[in-house]
Image: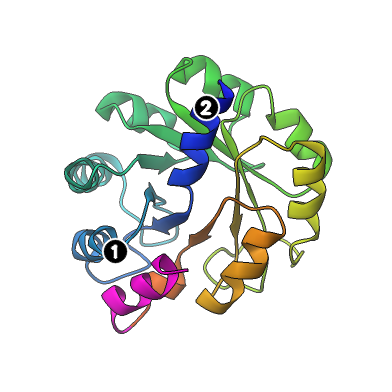
């Protein structure tokens, strides 16, 4: 990926909304509102005991993809490479316990986005040949991801940014609007948010609080 393309991708990571049906009562409506109010990238992360599977998951993915395309915002699918390929999603995001990034890149080809969650500098180095961006966290304590790992603050963001100055980085984990300036100043290109938007009593207001920073 050229430095110019990396810069464009980094801008799209500025406010990265991650959500599934278990995070909000009306996912499509929540995503529509969030996109209208400033979200720059969306990831469909369908996990958990009551998550959708099979045809229901695909139908939801297609509905969300249409909403994202209307808003001209990238639509990323968490972990499910086959689904992403079947509906021509913009990319896939995987964690360390999901399928290997090298295999995902082989399946996606060179033109789709691949994001990888990393928890150490070594994991970032391993992901680098295949990933277009990395997600680093948890920055703060979070209940949205039960497997999030120990809280790191922005220490790892600073370390990865120092070693890889042009690598697009998004911070994730318990992030509130007041946390964003320090996360960006410490090296992230943007923040990924789940519950601070999905669980907010007023999704529009919550999104705008992030988007105006």
SS at badge 2: helix
Residue 205 image-quadrant placement: bottom left
Q: Which mark is residue 34?
A: 1
Give the side of residue 134 with respect to residue 157, left or right: left
> Which secondary structure dominates the residues rendered in magenta?
helix
Give the side of residue 84 with respect to residue 114, left or right: left
For disc 2, the marked residue is 4
Residue at 23% of width from left, 48% of height from top? 64
Residue at 27% of width from left, 65% of height from top? 37
Residue 174 showing in the rendered view: no
Mark 2 / mark 1, whichever is N-terminal: 2
Residue at 25% of width from left, 62% of height from top? 27
Give the side of residue 145 with respect to residue 18, left or right: right
Residue 85: say if magenta: no
Compute the Cα span from label 2 to label 1. Answer: 27 Å
Residue 13 showing in the rendered view: yes
The residue lying toward the viewer, choosing from 150 and 58, is 150
State whether residue 110 is above or below residue 213: above
Magenta span of residues: 201-213
Label 2–label 1 contact, CB within 8 A: no
State whether residue 193 is above or below residue 88: below
Residue at 48% of width from left, 48% of height from top? 13
Q: Quadrant of the N terminus?
A: top right
SS at badge 1: helix
The residue lying toward the viewer, choosing from 56 and 133, is 133
**How far from the left and from the top, in percent, is residue 85?**
34, 24
**How far from the left and from the top, in percent, is residue 42?**
37, 50
């Amino acid at each position: 990926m050229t430095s110019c393309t990396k810069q464009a991708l980094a801008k799209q990571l500025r406010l990265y909304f991650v959500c599934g049906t278990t995070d909000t009562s009306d996912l499509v409506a929540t995503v529509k509102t969030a996109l209208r109010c400033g979200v720059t990238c969306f990831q469909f992360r369908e996990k958990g005991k009551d998550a959708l599977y099979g045809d229901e998951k695909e139908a939801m993915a297609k509905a969300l993809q249409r909403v994202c395309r209307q808003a001209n915002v990238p639509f990323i699918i968490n972990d499910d490479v086959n689904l992403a390929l079947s509906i021509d999603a913009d990319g896939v995001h995987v964690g360390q316990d999901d399928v290997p990034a090298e295999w995902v890149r082989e399946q996606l080809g060179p033109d789709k986005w691949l994001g990888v969650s990393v928890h150490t500098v070594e994991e970032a180095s391993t992901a680098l040949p295949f990933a277009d961006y990395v997600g680093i966290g948890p920055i703060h304590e979070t209940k949205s991801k039960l497997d999030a790992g120990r809280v790191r603050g922005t220490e790892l963001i600073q370390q990865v940014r120092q070693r890889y100055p042009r690598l697009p980085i998004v911070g994730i984990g318990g992030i509130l609007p007041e946390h964003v300036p320090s996360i960006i100043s410490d090296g992230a290109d943007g923040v990924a948010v789940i519950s601070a938007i999905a669980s907010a009593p007023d999704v529009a207001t919550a999104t705008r609080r992030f988007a105006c920073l």
